[in-house]
Amino acid sequence: MAAALIVLRIAAVIELEVYALYGLLIALLFAFIGWRAIKILWFPLLYLLFAVPLPDSLVAALTNPLKLWISDTAVALLYLANYPIASSGVTIQIGQYQLLVAAACAGLSSLITLSALTLFYVYLIHRSNWRYMMVLIAAAVPIAIFSNLVRVLLLILITYHVGEAAAQGFLHNFAGMTTFAIALIMIYALDKVAQTIIAFRTKELRVA
């Protein structure tokens, strides 16, 4: 692993160099403190992966389909609401305004951040139930995509009703914070509903 890190450092392949550095960290921990200690430290080591940037090629491959789906869905919904809207790829035309669905609106960044926060939340609350943890983390994916769809819808409506300057200013950041807050609330609500269902079914089984 150290040799791979040196080679990647010389070749200036920064994206893969970070992964080699992470692997070297795991190898050093294993060499000095053993496998049992690594099992104890599994959560901080796993959480550290969220700090590792994804390769640009992978980001592009994941982002482009998301951008297209979000733009097409937003246009379809607003068209049903009788707005003068159309799209060509990730470019949206509404009234006299033209908008571009950027990579930041495609859900990947918020998906990673929301997954990290969800992982931290479920680890604190449900660390003894790893299967339930995985279910909640998987639920963060569609929730993050949905929240970004809401963000794009808000920005389109702000642009149409208030103007492009407003949509690119404070309201742009506000829309991002609002939809991210909605996503966190949805994760929390999903957890509470699931816990209620599990508790109800457990009570039924005990009665039976």
Image (tube, rainbow, N blue to C red):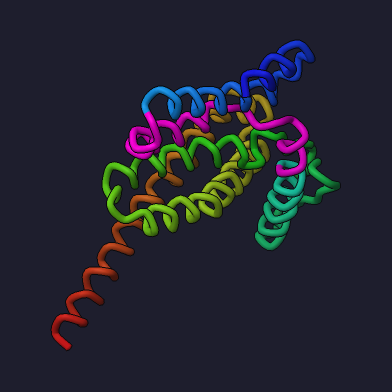
Q: Position of residue 66 (x, y in %)?
A: 70, 47
Residue toward you, 128 or 60: 128
Against 187, residue 180 (above or below) is above
Residue lying farthest to the top in this orientation: 10
Name the residue rendered at 62%, 19% in the picture.
2
Quarter of the rendering occupied by the C terminus: bottom left
Residue toward you, 50 or 77: 50
In the rendered structure, the answer to whether residue 78 lies left or right of residue 178 reads right
Is residue 42 rendered magenta in the image?
yes
Residue lying farthest to the right in this orientation: 88
Name the residue rendered at 41%, 44% in the picture.
118
Which residues are drawn in magenta?
A: 34-62
Against 205, residue 52 (above or below) is above
Name the residue rendered at 81%, 48% in the picture.
87
Name the residue rendered at 46%, 38% in the picture.
116
Q: Position of residue 157 (x, y in %)?
A: 62, 43
Residue toward you, 183 or 126: 126
